[in-house]
Amino acid sequence: MTALDRLVAGGTVTAAAQLAGLTTYKFGGPARWFADVGSMEELTSLLTAWRADGRPPALVVGRGSNLVVSDAGFEGLVIRLAGEFAEMVISSDGIVTAGAAVPLPKLARTTVKAGRGGLEWFIGIPGSVGGAVCMNAGGHGSDTREWIIDAEILAWSTGEVKTWGRDDLDLSYRHSAVSDDDLVLSARFRTVSRSPEEGEEMLREITQWRRLHQPGGTYNAGSVFKNPPGDAAGRIIDSLGLKGFTIGGASVSERHANFFEASHEASAQDVYDLVVAIQRRVREETGVELVPEVRFAGSFDPAPAVEGR
Ligand SMILES: Cc1cc2nc3c(=O)[nH]c(=O)nc-3n(C[C@H](O)[C@H](O)[C@H](O)COP(=O)(O)OP(=O)(O)OC[C@H]3O[C@@H](n4cnc5c(N)ncnc54)[C@H](O)[C@@H]3O)c2cc1C
């Protein structure tokens, strides 16, 4: 029995856990091991077992809003932070310390209620603080880089926790220096003084804009491709008449060509195939190489030719 299997027997890790419910696409197969981790103590003992087992593939899932998990699942350890990692504190000088598992809309709402501004734009992004740091999430003219002070990051391989400043994080458009070996535990953000009324109005405007411009009530993971320099991936895809283009249960959204929507019957492979097909069409017809923003986890056929992990 492996060290992780012993944690399964002890009830802190689940074997063959379904991942579909953990992502906004709502598909994907099981993880060999899955753990909801609520405290540093739990995380430390989990990582000790993981190292003892020879470091099988590992994945952190935030709110799964940028993730396509393979239909075959993930042959390794998947963890999701919860408990103390879902807490946030606003200090008297307006600095927000948020655990990696804090949902971004909650970060927006809580700071607005406290009379703090700057983070309102997070209201429209259905991810977590950890995911936002990893992806340098952004929108409405702002991004994580603009407001973050630093982040606490644990290295899977050594268990060491370090504070990474903005420069260490190296945040740029949908990019960070956070690697497969790094687990974001929390982040600190600066805010500015803003009345709750003004903040509420901003939240309303952003929410309304999202309703008008993005598909709602469907399974998707937001923008599929990064925008190429000086252009918008959605504009290019739309210009080629590819709105509505479908493979299996996955389609290019009619409302926003850079969103790919999945039906209830869709598979992860459908989305993967659609990504590859659209990438190829755009390359052939415009010469532009679109780079996926969504992350693929597990195996696809053929192996994902995408950036990142
Ligand atoms: C409707 C919709 C609208 C969206 N709009 C936007 C938008 O306007 N702007 C934008 O930037 N994004 C947008 N997104 C994409 C997505 O919400 C962001 O990328 C978000 O930051 C992902 O956070 P998450 O917690 O869901 O990450 P996940 O999807 O769970 O994971 C994404 C990546 O981050 C890693 N990760 C997650 N948590 C941690 C952690 N604690 N430590 C280390 N690595 C971690 C994962 O391993 C994975 O590689 C949208 C998505 C949807 C569904």
Image (cartoon, grey):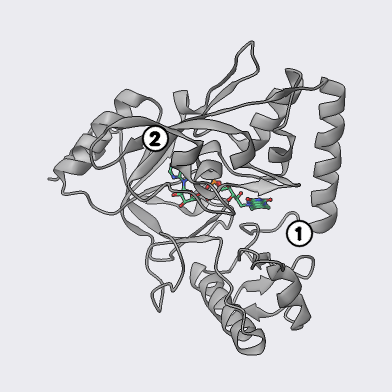
Say which amino acid is labelled 2.
Answer: Ile
State the mark number for residue 215.
1
On screen, 122 above or below 284? above
Q: Decide which of 188, 309 is in the foreground and name it.
A: 188
Measuring from the top left, give residue 164's x and y in whole percent: 43, 34
Q: Position of 47 compared to 154: left or right? A: left
Q: Quadrant of residue 158?
A: top left
Q: Residue at x 63, y 26 (%)?
A: 190
Question: Hey, which quadrant is residue 102 in on the image?
Answer: top right
At x 85% / y 37%, what residue is drawn?
204
Res. 15 in view: yes
Q: Is residue 180 above or below residue 197?
A: below
Q: Earlier in the sequence, mark 2 or mark 1?
A: 2
Residue at the spot of label 2: 153
> Disc 1 on helix, strand or loop?
loop
The image shows residue 59 at horizontal and vertical percentages of 37, 49
Is residue 5 something that shows in the picture?
A: no
Q: Residues within 10 Å of mark 1 (few under 14, many from 20)?
A: some
Quarter of the image where the N terminus is located: top left
Q: Nearer the viewer, residue 227 or 273?
A: 227
Q: CA distance from mark 2 to mark 1?
A: 34 Å
Q: Which mark is residue 155?
A: none
